[in-house]
Amino acid sequence: MSEFRRIVTTDDENGKSGVLIDGVASNRITVLTEMWVTGDEPVDPRDGIDHAERSDRLEPPAGGTLFRYFEIAPESETAHLSDAEKRKANAEWFAAMNGAHLQPDTSRHPGMHRSKTTDYIILLSGEITLLLDKEERTLKPFDCVIQRGTNHAWVNRGSETALLVAVLVDADTASRG
């Protein structure tokens, strides 16, 4: 899995800006490398907290955001598995991301999922196909997807791992009742 450097800024007690973190992001959840997470609380640039460490799931906190990299390996790496084994592996994968509840309809593909988020996704390298219930689109590097809470899956039919960056924004108005 790739390593991603991040530089996180801060303010000192006098309101002067500096660097809080300069290093490789260490919070990984399956294929996700968490860069930063926010909740619905006010931002405090002096808190001294690595907010990326707060993330333990596929979705952002209520009223919050998630910024992450994610990698999808080529399908050829699991070609030897039966359909049942692929479904089991995908179910375990989503459970490890605390996202099992996000899979209401996996009839098209075992990786299909739906979250109450608006996601801004950019493919950085490789090739990836976005599967939707009725259609699909293949992305090349620097193509963008604005994923608006629809059922979808990512499938890598290429020969190299696909690297994507995503910002997920909580869009569940019920959570802000």
Image (cartoon, rainbow, N blue to C red):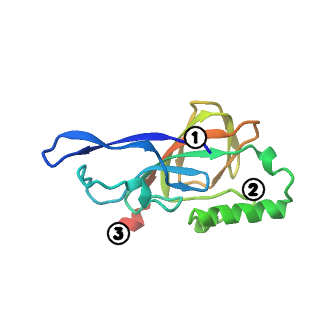
Residue carrying label 3: 177
In this picture, residue 18 sits left or right of residue 31:
left
Point out the tag, 2 or 1, that comes first from the N-terminus. 2
Pick the quarter of the image with the C terminus: bottom left
Q: Is residue 171 visible?
A: no
Q: Tell me which amino acid carries mark 2.
A: Arg
Crowd tier of the residue under label 3, counting other residues whose Cα lies within 10 Å: few below 14, some 14–19, many 20 or above:
few
Q: Position of residue 107 (x, y in %)?
A: 75, 61
Q: Which sits in the foreground, 73 or 7?
A: 7
Q: Tell me which amino acid carries mark 3.
A: Gly
Which structural element holds mark 3? loop
Q: Position of residue 159 (x, y in %)?
A: 76, 36
Residue shown at 50%/62% (left/top)? 56
Residue shown at 67%/34% (left/top)? 126
Most extreme residue toward the left, as rendered? Answer: 14
| Label of residue 108 in the image | 2
| Label of residue 164 in the image | 1
Point out the tag, 3 or 2, that comes first from the N-terminus. 2
> Up-down: is 96 above or below 127?
below
* Mark pair 3, 1: CA separation: 32 Å
Residues at marks 2 and 1 touching, judged by CB atoms closer than 8 Å: no
Q: Position of residue 124 (x, y in %)?
A: 58, 33
